[in-house]
Amino acid sequence: MDMTRRPRRLRTDGVRPLVRETEVSASDLIAPVFVDATTDERVPIETMPGHERVPVEESVARVEEVLETGVEAIMVFGIPESKDEQGSRAWAEDGVVQDAVRRISEATDAYVITDVCLCEYTSHGHCGLLEDHAQVDPDLTVRNDETLDLLGKIAVSHARAGADMVAPSGMIDGMVGAIRAALDADGHSEVPIMSYAAKFESAFYGPFRDAADGAPAFGDRRHYQMDPANAREARREVELDVEQGADVLMVKPALPYLDVVAQVREDYDHPVAAYNVSGEYAMLHAAADKGWLQLEAVAHESLLSIKRAGADLILTYFAEDIADRL
Ligand code: PBG
């Protein structure tokens, strides 16, 4: 037996940190923040222990909590006071996200990213304008091209309020190009777009849909979000967003799609983001609650795996807890 090669030599406490290939640091993490126009006090999100929907008046305080942990970037999600067919509160100048972002960017140094989508704002919960026959024909849900104008309006309203970056999450064909054009036309050519480029129609979003009150009232999102079975299709999806000017490419969810993260890393020089989604967070919490897993260890290992697969930035509900520990 040839025992010249002994990998264990590099596993002592002294040398392990020197040869470590991957690290998670607070500067890689983005913390999701939920701002809720329907409440005047903080409401715990049952399916995501440790997270809350906060009223607009509390948004600065909430972001200060994030900053204290060392995390410098946030992703803002809004729950509007009312919903309609078009989702018009999504681009209102006095909308919940616009109001919160104005306060946060005035009062803090946080890097503010906003989720650009319609599902929390439409009465039917879909990510765009509905086709006339959507309720009867499951193959028809969102009117793609008419939705693009609205996404442009939402992104512009966020940029005007002070958003540093916008993140379209609706999987509407052409959304990145439409948003880029709208931002540029309104004088926001410096605002980057982080595209949810390969977003899958995943059952792991369940807890978020409770948190943000954005579940579709009928049908599902299969006609715009990707089939979980398809990695080659993800290549074509991402390519389109690159052509339309996406600055950061996101894969979502993260852990069940690490092959896709690795593939995007391999294919492009762009920064790659991964969204460690609500279901990935909730399942670790649930198992830890039962005493079956050690929460901090599995959370850290999850984030490490996402970085190892090739992500530069990670959106995660663990951001504050992990940053605190680092
Ligand atoms: C859509 C959006 C969703 C998430 C982020 N943005 C929900 C969806 O597509 O149904 C999910 C995030 C998570 O599960 O953590 N605006």
Image (cartoon, grey):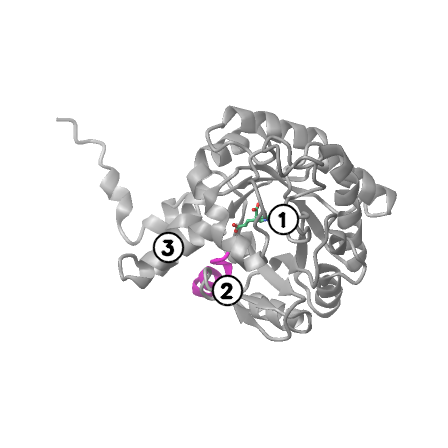
Determine the CA span between mark 1 and mark 2: 19 Å
The yes-or-no answer for disc 3 within 8 Å of ligand 1 is no
Of mark 2 and mark 3, the one earlier in the sequence is 2
At 67% from the left and 31% from the top, the residue drawn is 242
Q: Main secondary structure of the magenta part?
A: helix
Q: Nearer the viewer, residue 322 or 13?
A: 322
In the rendered view, tell whether residue 80 sits above or below residue 225: below
Image spot of residue 151 (x, y percent): 74, 44
Check disc 1 and report its element: helix, strand or loop.
Answer: loop
Check disc 3 and report its element: helix, strand or loop.
Answer: helix
Circle nearer the viewer, 1 or 2: 1
Amino acid at the residue labelled 1 = Gly
Query: In the image, is residue 110 part of the stretch drawn in magenta?
Result: no
Circle nearer the viewer, 3 or 1: 1
The yes-or-no answer for disc 2 within 8 Å of ligand 1 is no
In the rendered view, tell whether residue 151 sits above or below residue 47: above
Report the residue marked by disc 3.
284
Report the residue marked by disc 2.
45
Q: Quadrant of the N terminus?
A: top left
In the rendered view, tell whether residue 18 sits above or below residue 296: above
Image spot of residue 280 (x, y percent): 43, 50
Q: Nearer the viewer, residue 194 or 270?
A: 194
Q: Nearer the viewer, residue 28 or 209?
A: 209
Amino acid at the residue labelled 2 = Ile
Residue lying farthest left? Answer: 1
Q: What crowding class fits label 3: few (fewer than 14 Cα within 10 Å), some (14-19), or many (20 or more)?
A: some
Q: What crowding class fits label 2: few (fewer than 14 Cα within 10 Å), some (14-19), or many (20 or more)?
A: some
On the question of residue 111 being in view, the answer is yes
Quarter occupied by residue 189: top right
Determine the CA span between mark 3 and mark 1: 27 Å
Magenta range: 317-326
- Please tell me the numbered disc located at residue 125: 1
